[in-house]
Image (cartoon, rainbow, N blue to C red):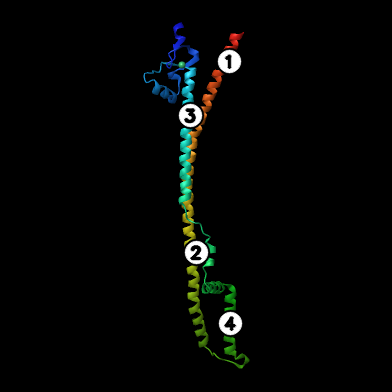
Amino acid sequence: MAENLTVHCIVDDQEYHVDEGLYLADLSTAIRQRVKQDYPQAKVTDFICGHHLLKYRLANVDAMISSDLKQSQKINRKLTRAMQSDDYEITDVNETLTKSLTFGERIADDVARFGGSWGFIGIFIFVLISWMLVNSLQLFGIHFDRFPFILLNLVLSCISAIQAPIIMMSQNRSADRDRMAAENDFHVNLKSEHELRILHAKLDHLSQNQIPHTLEIEKLQIEILSEIRSELAELRDHHK
Ligand SMILES: [Zn+2]
């Protein structure tokens, strides 16, 4: 067993105690591959001393940090590009439509609004009944439109003939408004979906690379700390 306690470091071929380092089999895959890059003949039964191992561990940490940095820069660039390329301006549909209204259209809107109200129906019924009463009972001694009220018929036809196109005008514009609103919504949705996808990529990168890397670095720190502690304890033992 005694000859097993001294081993040779693969880097400088010096003799070390087994406690002063690790066998390649005990290293993490990434670090073992790093060692194998420099020493292709290395086997898992080879030994590396703590001092040289630290060098490889730090190189590994450096590589992790720089790859994380590169990846997040890439994602940030993507996000910036997506924000810039989207030049669609979100419009306030109501404001745009109100500004483009002509005088005639505004009147059509008012007429359509009044024509579709209870007030209009009330006034209309009142006028109809008065017209009929005046002409059948000859109130005030006038009867310009005897039964069956042919003139009244003509007036009603005229009113409905004019009212129909006015209502249509008003309806056309509300269709315009719906179309514009739908277009606006579509663009806003598209934009948010794109940004969401990039955010997803960012989150995936965080959870799949950055957090495991951080944990790995933390583990390394704890390992180094415990090595320092055991060395300190050894030193104390020597001084006693
Ligand atoms: Zn060494």
- Residue 85 vs 42, above or below: the answer is below
* Placement of the N terminus among the 4 image quadrants: top left
> Which residue is pictured at 49% across the width and 21% down the height?
54
Q: Position of residue 45 (x, y in %)?
A: 41, 16
Please tell me which of labels 1 and 3 falls first in the chain. Answer: 3
| Residue 1 in view, yes or no | no
Badge 1 is on which residue? 232
Q: Element at badge 2? A: helix
Number of other residues with Cα within 10 Å of mark 4, as a class: few under 14, some 14 to 19, many 20 or more: few
Q: Are marks 1 and 3 in contact (CB under 8 Å)?
A: no
Q: CA distance from mark 1 to mark 2?
A: 79 Å
Q: Which residue is mark 3?
A: 62
Q: Are marks 4 and 3 in contact (CB under 8 Å)?
A: no
- The residue where tag 4 is placed is 127
- What kind of residue is marked 2? Arg
Identify the secondary structure beneath mark 3. Answer: helix
Q: Residue at x 57, y 85 (%)?
A: 131
Cα distance in 3D space between marks 2 and 3: 58 Å
Question: Which residue was labeled with disc 2?
Answer: 177
Q: Label 3 amino acid? A: Asp
From the viewer's side, name the closer residue of 76 and 120.
76
- Disc 1 + disc 2, Cβ < 8 Å: no
Comparing marks 1 and 2, which lies closer to the viewer?
Answer: 1
Which image quarter is the C terminus in?
Answer: top right
Q: Position of residue 189 (x, y in %)?
A: 48, 52
Separation of marks 4 and 3 at Cα, in angstroms? 91 Å
Image location (x, y in percent) of residue 7: 44, 11
CA gap, disc 2 and disc 4: 36 Å
What secondary structure is marked by label 4? helix
Q: Amino acid at mark 4?
A: Val
Please identify the quarter of the rendering in which residue 24 is found: top left
Q: Are marks 1 and 4 in contact (CB under 8 Å)?
A: no
